[in-house]
Image (spheres, helix red, strand yellow):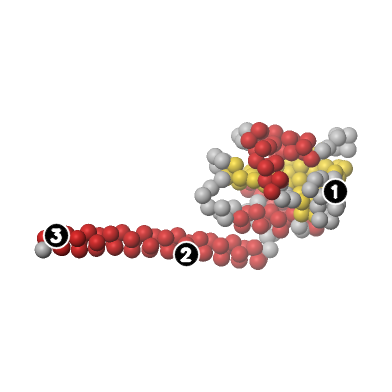
Amino acid sequence: MNQIYQYLSSSNVIFFNSMQRATKKRVFEEACLAFQMSGVPHTQVFEALYARERLGNNALGAGVALPHCEIEGLKQPIITIVLLQRPIHVDPTPYDTKPVDIFFFLIVPKTDNDDEYLPLLRECIAMMEDKTLCAKIRKAENAVEVCACIMDWVAPTVLARESKEDALENEWDILNEEVKAQLKQEQGVTSLTVAAVENNS
């Protein structure tokens, strides 16, 4: 089991057949149309994805790319998968120089906590680096089969442990902030009391 499948619906799995001329821009446009059907404006998500692309290469190698970004006002993560019958070369070039035929798009809500969706991104990377799973996805004949592959994938134990550690660390940080706030408040009350006593004297 994994946390990814809940953010993917069969309507967000797109197949490009061999007759369709695919380019990186065309793939991104198709993905953004799917996101628009989920309530995210096409232009907003397209610009955000390409802005993130300019920061660094999102190709994982072995024919897989994982474009991702944060979206203001989004309520929960959304995933779109675009599969090509004919792999295409992308820029920036992947480290292994292989053309890409699986585009796994992930958009998440923009929050004050930059690390909130890091565990989900780590899991997506681990999933897309699983060559056995990718082989099954490439053989899938329809969107339902792709979703079934995603649902059946089991996240590595180390990821679950890291996510738990991240959650505990986050709770610890919140607790520390609460303690600091409480101490500051108590010091403020003490200062006021001392000042009142000095004035009375």
Residue 169 spot, x, y in % from top left: 52, 64
List x then y, in percent, for residue 143.
Answer: 75, 42
Pointers 1 and 3 in contact (CB under 8 A)?
no
Q: Is residue 105 above or below residue 152?
A: above
Residue ID at (61%, 34%): 39
Q: Nearer the viewer, residue 118 or 12?
A: 118
Residue at 33% x, 61% y: name it: 184
Q: Nearer the viewer, residue 179 or 189?
A: 189
**Mark 1 or 3 closer to N-term?**
1
Q: Nearer the viewer, mark 1 or mark 3?
A: 3
Mark 1 or mark 2, earlier in chain: 1
Residue 123, percent across and down? 67, 57
Report the side of 30 relative to 166 (left or right).
right
Where is mark 2, residue-wise?
Answer: 172
Which of the image's four quarters has the C terminus?
bottom left
Q: Secondary structure at mark 2?
A: helix
Q: Residues within 10 Å of mark 2 (few under 14, many from 20)?
A: few
Residue drawn at the location 81% of the way across and 52% of the way down: 94
Secondary structure, mark 3, is: helix
- The residue under label 3 is which amino acid type? Asn
Which of the marked residues, 2 or 3, is nearer the chain's N terminus? 2
Which residue is under mark 3?
199
Measured Cα–Cα span from mark 1 to mark 3: 78 Å
Label 1: element kind: loop
Q: Amino acid at mark 1?
A: Pro
Residue pushed farthest left? 201
Q: Which residue is mark 1?
A: 99
Q: Which mark is residue 176?
A: none
State which quadrant residue 84 falls in.
Answer: top right
